[in-house]
Image: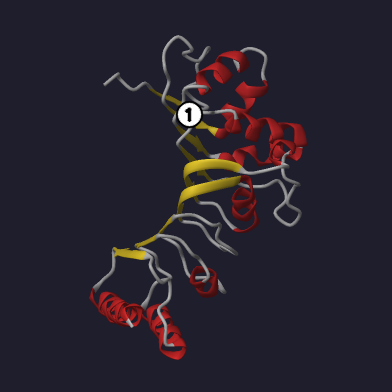
Amino acid sequence: MPCQSRLKVTRHARILEYPVYRALTHLAIDGIVFIEDLVGPSRGVSLRTALTGVRYLTLNQLTVCAFTFRDARVLDIFFQSIRSMSKLKRITLGHFALPDPNHPPRLPACLANSPIPIKALNIHHTHGEALSFLFECFEPENLLLESCWFIRHLPDCDELTLSRIQTFDKFFNVLLGWDGRKLTIDSCPFLDEMFVKRLRGVMIDAEKAVWPGVNIFFHGYGYEVWRRIEEFQDLRWRLEMQ
């Protein structure tokens, strides 16, 4: 197998030119550097060329970029550069934020007709309207949310992984309404004994399983919660077998 090429670029460790002479498959870069180099005259060409071979892109510290997204042109360039990455399999976005959460911007022009299809979308430390905005921008097959708050809805996807998600209002119904093939809940504080009891209660009242046909996996829970999970799984299995 050919060697994979990896590159990490931060605000404190920038480069003069991106390696266009070899296949760059993994790129981790601070969001503000990504934007400045895209729109700047000196590194824009080499960065865009390098992106054509990238399969795994990680954009870190995107909160710093919020002020730049006030400019609709910059927002469009940001998402257009991602859309143009034909080999991209997974994108990871950390700390994405909008300039004004109370007044989300319109979708970028490049996404007017359709969102960006992506095999895997990983989102970390992104909340509320900023998270909802990203759901409008991407169409993932597999979605991972880690340390995200105020999840108001979930997009259609085959696989959903929730990690370290806190408790907040209305998330019970949001999660209950999700439909896919595989659900993984890993070390999420929202999944306590009461939450699992509510899930079980929904099935008892409706006399049918929640998430029928979905493979569900739980990780990172202690004895008391795990006991409730086993009761939930047992009832769910029996209802599916009816």
Q: Secondary structure at mark 1?
A: loop
Give the image location of residue 149, x and y in percent: 53, 61
Residue 27 % position (x, y): 45, 28
Front residue of 67 and 132? 132
Q: Residue furthest front?
A: 242
Q: Is residue 132 above or below residue 225?
A: above
| Colour mapping used in the image | secondary structure
Residue at image location 48% in from the left, 32% down from the top? 88
Please identify the quadrant where the C terminus is shown. Answer: bottom left
Residue that lies at the very extreme toward the bottom in this rendered image: 205
Q: Which residue is pictured at 42% across the width and 12% down the height?
A: 22
Position of the N terminus, as image quadrant, is: top left
201 is higher (above) or lower (below) than 69? below
Q: Position of residue 198 (x, y in %)?
A: 43, 83
- How many marks the image carries: the answer is 1
Mark 1 lies on residue: 87
52 relative position to 218: left or right = right
In front of the other: 72 or 13: 72
Residue at image point 40% right, 79% down: 209
Q: Residue furthest left?
A: 223
Q: Amino acid at mark 1?
A: Lys
The quadrant in which residue 204 appears is bottom left
- Residue in the picture at 45% in, 9% down: 21
Q: Quadrant of residue 203?
A: bottom left
Q: Is 58 placed left or right of 5 in the picture?
A: right
Crowd tier of the residue under label 1, counting other residues whose Cα lies within 10 Å: few below 14, some 14–19, many 20 or above: some
Q: Is residue 12 left or right of residue 225?
A: right
Q: Is residue 142 left or right of 47 when viewed as pictured?
A: left
Q: List x then y, in percent, for residue 222.
A: 25, 71
